[in-house]
Amino acid sequence: MIEPKQIALQFLQAFWDGKPEDGLALCAPDARWTFQKSLREPRFADIANAIDFLMTKLVGEFDPDSGYEVDVHHVVGDGDEVAVEYSARGETRRGDLYENDYVVRFTLRDGKIVSVRPYFDTHYVHRVLARLDDGG
């Protein structure tokens, strides 16, 4: 059986690589994503809906020619609970520099992800990357 830390990292790597289907394969059918209050309503979504939203509204805003870089700083696990701390940076389609720090908490059950809870500066995401406040 793959270690929970490895499953969490594989999920994030699939997301970063633009291969959401690979990440979804690591999730239980009832897996849930918790959005921060200022990012989206409803706050809780099934994992496929959440990833679709994120790929369209956030990852899709990076310049495809420049891409983005991710630096993983820490991966901490306690049984089926895992936290991954990382930084992401890249150029947006509008030419703005984006750089943000993240901590993503995962809960696993029977080797599958059942909960994803990211923490990051949503004000910065609104302002620089997604411009969700502008109806985007």
Image (tube, grey):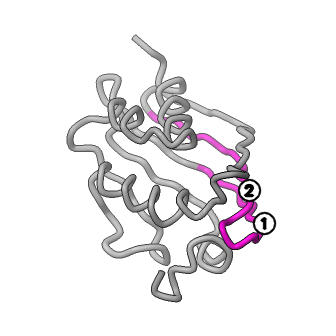
Residue 90 numbered mark, or none: 2
Q: Residues within 10 Å of mark 1 (few under 14, many from 20)?
A: some
Classify residue 9 as left or right of residue 80.
right
66 drawn magenta: no
- State the residue lying farthest toward the bottom: 134
Q: What residue range appears in magenta?
A: 81-103
Left or right for 3, reference 127: left
Picture layout, residue 105 above or below residue 76: below
Q: Nearer the viewer, residue 122 or 60?
A: 60
Q: Position of residue 78 (x, y in %)?
A: 52, 29
> Looking at the rendering, which quadrant does residue 56 occupy?
bottom left
Q: Based on the displayed image, in which of its 4 quarters is residue 20 positioned?
A: top left
Q: Residue furthest top?
A: 1
Residue positioned 46% across, 38% down in the render: 19
The quarter in which the N terminus is drawn is top left
The type of residue carrying mark 1 is Leu
Q: Does residue 56 appear to the left or right of 129 in the view shown?
A: left
Amino acid type of the residue tagged 2 in the rendering:
Gly
Kindly report the secondary structure that dominates the magenta region of the rendered protein: strand
Residue to which mark 1 is pinned: 97
Residue 122 in the image: state x and y as whole percent: 59, 72
Q: Position of residue 96 (x, y in %)?
A: 76, 71
Q: Mark 1 and 2 residues: CB-CB less than 8 Å, in contact? A: yes
State the image coordinates of residue 121 (x, y, percent, origin top left).
64, 68
| Disc with the residue nearer the chain's start (1 vs 2) | 2
Helix, strand or loop for disc 2: strand
Relative to residue 7, is residue 92 depicted above or below? below
Residue 93 lies in the magenta-colored region? yes
